[in-house]
């Protein structure tokens, strides 16, 4: 039986907004974490919905927990970008 190698592309090498992601996909580690640990979805469900191997989902979760400082910086950067975009958006008319 052959062993499958999974790989997470670190943020420093990522072309997806500098976020770590699953190699060969555009699925970020932050997104995997949010779906599994934030929304409570099973890793198998996330894998099936996003056409990745369940082992890659677990790899992404492990990466998230092994690299807390990097992931906190990613979260902070994402929150700031969202806030800046919200400020630039016009308020809806009442």
Image: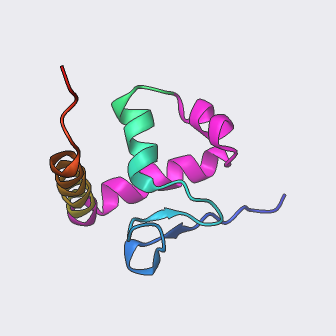
| Magenta stretch: dominant secondary structure | helix
**Which of the 4 quarters of the picture holds residue 4?**
bottom right
Say which residue appears at 62% left-offset and 63% top-offset: 6
Residue 61 location (% of width, % of height) = 43, 49
Q: Is residue 47 magenta?
A: yes
Instruction: Establish if 89 lies above or below 78.
Output: above
**Of the pair 2 and 80, the residue shown nearer to us:** 80
Q: How is the image coloured?
A: rainbow
Say which residue appears at 38% left-offset and 71% top-offset: 18
Give the magenta-colored segment's residue range.
42-71
Placement of the C terminus among the 4 image quadrants: top left
Position of residue 20 in the picture relative to residue 92 (left or right): right
- Name of the residue lying farthest toward the right: 1
**Of the pair 82 and 37, the residue shown nearer to us:** 82
Q: Is residue 62 magenta?
A: yes
Residue 83 location (% of width, % of height) = 17, 49
- Name of the residue lying farthest toward the bottom: 13
Say which residue appears at 43% left-offset and 46% top-offset: 31
**Count the marks: how many?**
0
**Of the pair 14 and 44, the residue shown nearer to us:** 14
Residue 32 location (% of width, % of height) = 46, 45
- Name of the residue lying farthest toward the front: 93
**Of the pair 2 and 68, the residue shown nearer to us:** 68
Position of residue 44 in the picture relative to residue 36 (left or right): right
Placement of the N terminus among the 4 image quadrants: bottom right
């Amino acid at each position: 039986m052959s062993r499958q190698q999974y790989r997470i592309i670190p943020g420093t090498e990522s072309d997806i907004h500098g976020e770590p992601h699953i190699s060969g996909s555009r699925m970020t580690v932050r997104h995997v974490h949010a779906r599994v640990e934030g929304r409570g979805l099973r890793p198998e469900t996330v894998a099936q919905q996003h056409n990745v191997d369940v082992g890659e989902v677990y790899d992404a979760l492990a990466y998230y927990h092994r690299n807390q400082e990097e992931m906190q910086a990613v979260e902070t950067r994402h929150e700031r970008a969202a806030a800046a975009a919200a400020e630039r958006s016009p308020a809806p008319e009442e």
